[in-house]
Image (cartoon, grey):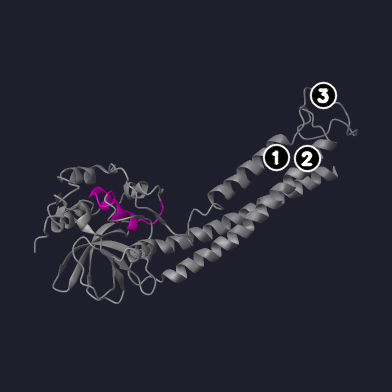
Amino acid sequence: MSTFILETDAVTSSASSIQSLASSMDNISSSVKGYDTSCEDGFDFASAVNTISSNIDACSTKMQNTINVMESVVNSHTQLQNSLVFSGDNAGGPTSNDANATPTNNAQPVGGNYAGGYTGGYSGGYSGNYGGGSLGFGSAQLISSKKKKKSKTTNKPYKSALKDLDLQETFDNEEDARQQIVEIAATQLGNKDESDYLSLLGEGQGAQWCSEFVVWCANESGLVDAGAVPLFRDAASGVKWFKEHNQFKGKDYTPKAGDIIFVGNPTVHHTALVAEVKDGVIHTIEGNIKDKVVRKTRSIGDSNIYGYGTPDYSKVVKKDNGTEKPTSV
C-alpha cells in the first residue's frame, strides 16, 4: 500500500509540474507574439529577445523538473510492479496480502503502459518540441549561397501573377535584372501566406519571414543561383554576408532599385527590397508587416536605417566573348 501511495503522490506531483511547464510555455508564446511586431520600425528588439530568453531559461528549468518527476513516476511504478500484481477483477486492488500471490483471471502486471506513456509522451514531447531550440536565438541563421530550386507559389492569386511575368536568369544589363526582382516582389503585394518563403529555407509556419521574402524574390530572379544573394534567415546574417563580400553600404548611401535595405537602430532586425528611389524617398516592398507583403517608404538617411546590401547584379548580366555588356545609363 505504501508503494501505491508513493506512486499516486508522484503522479500528482507530475501533474503539477506539467501545469507549471505549460504556464512557462504560455509566457514564451506571449513573448513571441510581442516579437512578431519586431518588423515594425522603432521596435525594442533587444528587450524582446531578453524577455523571450528569460522565459526560455525558466521553461528549461521547469522542463527538467518535469522530467525528474516523470522518472519518479517510473521508479514508483517499478516498485509497485515488483511488490504487487493487480487482478483483472479487482480494478486496482491487490489479489492477496501476499506480494508473491499468483495473479488470477489472466491479470497482467502494471507499469509498462504508464512508464512508456509518461516518459515517452511528456519527456519526449516537451524535450523535442521545446527543448530543441526551435526559436533559434543566439545562432547564425545564414544557410548557404548554394543553388535552390525555384519554389512553386501555393497561393493561387499570387502564383498566377508571378506566372504572368516572363522571368529570365540572365540579362542584357543590370537595370533589367534589378527591374525583374522588383516586379517579382510586386506580384506578392497583399499576400498573407508566407509558406512559400519559409519553405525555401526549410522553415515552418510561425517563423519570422521578412528576410525569407527577400531571399525568395532573389531566388525567383536567379540571383541565388548566381551567388549574388545568399540564403539567409535573419537580417543580421544578411548584413554579415554582404559585409564579408564588401557589398554593404551605410545608412547615408543612396540605394538603387533591387538593393536590400536593413532596418534597426542600434540592432538590425528587419530587411526589405528597395523598389524605387525618388525625390529623396526610398520606396520598398517588404514582408512580415502585419503578416503580409506591403509597400513602405523611408527618407534617405533615416535614423532607423541600418544600411544596405548591394547584390552584384553583374553576375546575371550576359557575357559576349568574356566581356559583360555595358550597363545602360
- Residue 15, how many percent across, how many down? 66, 50
The quarter in which the C terminus is drawn is bottom left
Residue at far left of view? 329
User: Which comes before the other along the chain, label 3 or label 2?
Assistant: 2
Q: Secondary structure at mark 1?
A: helix
Q: Nearer the viewer, residue 198 or 291?
A: 198
Q: Label 1 neighbourhood size at 10 Å, few (<14), some (14-19), many (20+)?
A: many
Instruction: From the image, tell me which residue sits under label 2.
Output: 78
Q: Is residue 76 visible?
A: yes
Tags 2 and 1 in contact by the CB under 8 Å rule?
yes
Residue at 45 percent of width and 60 percent of height = 32
* The magenta stretch spans residue 300: no
Q: CA distance from mark 3 to mark 2?
A: 20 Å
Residue holding disc 1: 115
Q: Which residues are magenta?
A: 206-225
Q: Which mark is residue 104?
A: 3
Spatial CA distance of label 1 from label 3 is 23 Å
Please provide percent x and percent y for residue 175: 14, 58
Nearer-the-camera pick, 321 or 141: 321
Query: Which tag, 2 or 1, sits closer to the chain's start?
Result: 2
Which quadrant holds residue 261?
bottom left
* Crowd rating for badge 3 (residues with CA inside 10 Å; few <14, some 14–19, many 20+): some
Estimate the x, y position of residue 106 in percent, counting from the top left.
Answer: 77, 22
From the top left corner, tell me how far across and down residue 322 is, in percent.
16, 52
Q: Amino acid at mark 3?
A: Thr
Say what amino acid the circle numbered 1 marks.
Ala
